[in-house]
Image: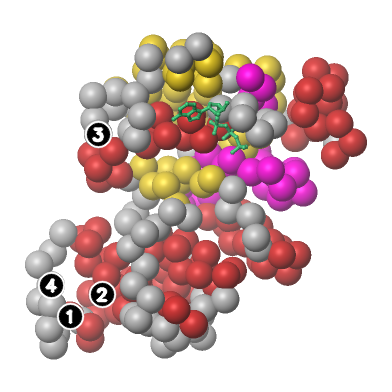
């Protein structure tokens, strides 16, 4: 068994009297999609924010690729390759898809590319950018301005930009939201391939997508993980059916 990429141990976070995550432990293994599901207010976003470093746990510890990262701020964790996608604020609406992804490649490489003439035709930027655009399913749209993309295409652009950062793990918070049926199908196929690039911790309410994608599922209820298992194990778990899945299973 490979070492986990990400390992959460005993994470606890309270807001006043409310315990939002209560002794949460889970692992993200190489190559897997681990879905985190649970009712509204269960603590899923609070958990993700502790992993990214946006908020500090009251107790517990996080290891990333074997290193304890509790003392690192969000920027340092991002530099290690912990990528939270779908909240990319850096998409420039007036730039094309290709130019946006090139900027992400340039940012990730740390190289001092000149801002004027050379950079936008530099093959060290155009080649990896074109590759990530294809990986994200946006081939043929490279020349379109970001502002003109449809919602689902914008999400693919965000994936391409996240890929440019060469992540070691993806944290995805409700990627299916607002995608529609066909968009959701396409995104499911893209995410399925993405797990080989880096494992994915997937917070998602769309159970069709979760059941199609997840290698393992953890169920969070009132801040506690009540079950972790394969899709079949979780669908068959009576406590999970009672507290969350109901008829969806
Ligand atoms: N900054 C905060 N201050 C006070 N309470 C908070 C804060 N952030 C979250 N909470 C509370 O913590 C609980 C868990 O919220 P969280 O957003 O993590 O749940 P969630 O599982 O992501 O919900 P959803 O599925 O609706 O996004 C909720 O009761 C929420 O109101």
Sequence-earlier tag: 4 or 2: 4
- Evaluate whether residue 27 shows in this view: yes
Rounded to the nearest angstrom, the CA distance separating label 1 from label 2 is: 8 Å
Secondary structure at badge 3 equals loop
Q: Which residues are magenta?
A: 195-222
Marks 1, 3: nearer the viewer? 3
Q: Which residue is mark 4?
A: 113
Q: Which residue is mark 2?
A: 125
Q: Residue visible at 45% across and 19% down?
A: 15
Q: Along the horizontal axis of the image, is 92 left or right of 133?
A: left
Mark 4 vs 2: CB contact within 8 A: yes
Q: Residues within 10 Å of mark 2 (few under 14, many from 20)?
A: many
Q: Residue furthest right?
A: 247
Relative height, residue 244 to residue 124 (above, below): above
Sequence-earlier tag: 4 or 3: 3
Mark 1 vs 4: CB contact within 8 A: yes
Q: Residues within 10 Å of mark 4 (few under 14, many from 20)?
A: some
Mark 2 vs 3: CB contact within 8 A: no
Q: Along the horizontal axis of the image, is 186 left or right of 132?
A: right
Q: Give the label on residue 119, or none.
A: 1
Q: Which residue is mark 3?
A: 73
Secondary structure at badge 1 equals helix
Marks 4, 3: nearer the viewer? 3
């Amino acid at each position: 068994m490979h070492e986990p990429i990400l390992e959460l141990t005993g994470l606890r976070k309270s807001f006043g009297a409310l315990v939002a995550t209560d002794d949460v432990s889970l692992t993200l293994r190489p190559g897997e999609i681990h879905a985190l599901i649970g009712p509204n207010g269960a603590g899923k976003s609070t958990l993700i924010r502790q992993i990214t470093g946006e908020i500090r746990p009251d107790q517990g510890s996080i290891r990333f690729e074997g290193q304890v990262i509790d003392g690192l701020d969000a920027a340092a964790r991002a530099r290690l390759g912990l990528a939270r996608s779908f909240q990319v604020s850096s998409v420039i609406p007036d730039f094309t898809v290709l130019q946006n992804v090139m900027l992400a490649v340039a940012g990730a490489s740390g190289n001092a590319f000149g801002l004027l003439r050379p950079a936008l035709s530099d093959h060290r930027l155009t080649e990896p950018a074109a590759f990530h655009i294809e990986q994200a399913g946006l081939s043929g749209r490279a020349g379109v301005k970001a502002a003109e993309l449809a919602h689902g295409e914008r999400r693919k652009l965000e994936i391409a930009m996240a890929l440019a950062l060469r992540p070691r793990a993806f944290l995805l918070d409700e990627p299916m939201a607002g995608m529609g049926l066909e968009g959701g199908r396409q995104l499911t196929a893209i995410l399925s391939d993405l797990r080989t690039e880096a494992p994915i911790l997937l917070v998602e309410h769309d159970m069709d997508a979760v059941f199609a994608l997840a290698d393992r599922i953890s169920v969070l209820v009132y801040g506690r993980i009540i079950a972790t298992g394969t899709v079949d194990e979780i669908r068959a778990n009576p406590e999970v059916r009672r507290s969350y899945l109901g008829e969806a299973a």
